Amino acid sequence: MPEEIMMIRDVPPADRPRERMRTGGAGSLSNHELLAILLRSGTKNESVLQVANRVLQAFEGLRMLKDASLEEITAIKGIGEAKAIQIMAALELGRRVSDLKFEERYVIRSPEDGANYVMEDMRFLSQEHFVALYLNTKNQVLHKQTLFIGSLNASIVHPREVFKEAFRRSAASVICIHNHPSGDPAPSREDIEVTKRLAECGKILGIDLLDHLIIGEKKYVSLKEKGYL
């Protein structure tokens, strides 16, 4: 890089936007400091912070800059096409983030709701799949994850794997589900033992096991309704 071009590293340490972001977070930076991080370098006679300030002045702030064309941005001294494209890309990302909407989350109010949520995916599986649904405090499904594939037994279904994901998702509760490829959802001794083990671990961790559903051919069994929870 030619010596005459002033980079962010040439700005005095106390004024470096990247350093300030590292220590104080992005929210501690002004608009022109954030823009300076995108631009990276200034010109022969101006620091990157000065160029960033001039860009904002030219558009009277972010409101007009967000709708500026490539030609309008490159018309500013010190802003080439590459820098203009970086600015436009960052603004478009910001626009898309602001447009994000929370998707409607499936709410589980009963064992039937839980069974309906997975029935079509699980009733034709040729192997047993152990699935966990992670719910928030409103019983909305935050995440669905297949944790194990194979015959269900206490040595395969590790509570740490079930509840590790619950912590990652900040889930308030869990519903465990597995299928019986035979089509008969009647619980086995292993099913009952696994359920009790998971429920005990959940109580210790403060994450409720709301139910354990067994999926058969268009029918299901709730171990909660059967009195095992």
Image (spheres, rainbow, N blue to C red):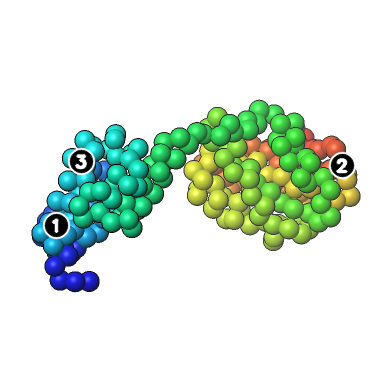
Q: Mark 2: which secondary structure?
A: loop
> What is the C-alpha distance between the residues marked 3 and 1?
17 Å
Disc with the residue nearer the chain's start (2 vs 1):
1
Could you tell me residue 188's position as x and y percent?
Answer: 82, 48
Q: Residue at label 3? A: 58
Q: Mark 1: which secondary structure?
A: loop
**Label 3 is placed on what type of residue?**
Ala
Residue at figure coordinates x 12%, y 56% from the top left:
46
**Label 2 is placed on what type of residue?**
Glu
Q: In which quarter of the view is residue 177 placed?
A: top right
Could you tell me residue 160's position as x and y percent?
Answer: 57, 55
* Quarter of the picture holding the C terminus: top right
Q: Residues within 10 Å of mark 1 (few under 14, many from 20)?
A: many
Q: Residues within 10 Å of mark 3 (few under 14, many from 20)?
A: few
**Label 1 is placed on what type of residue?**
Ser
* Quarter of the picture holding the N terminus: bottom left
Total marks in image = 3
Could you tell me residue 174's position as x and y percent?
Answer: 61, 41
Q: Residue at label 2? A: 217
Q: Is residue 54 above or below residue 161?
A: above
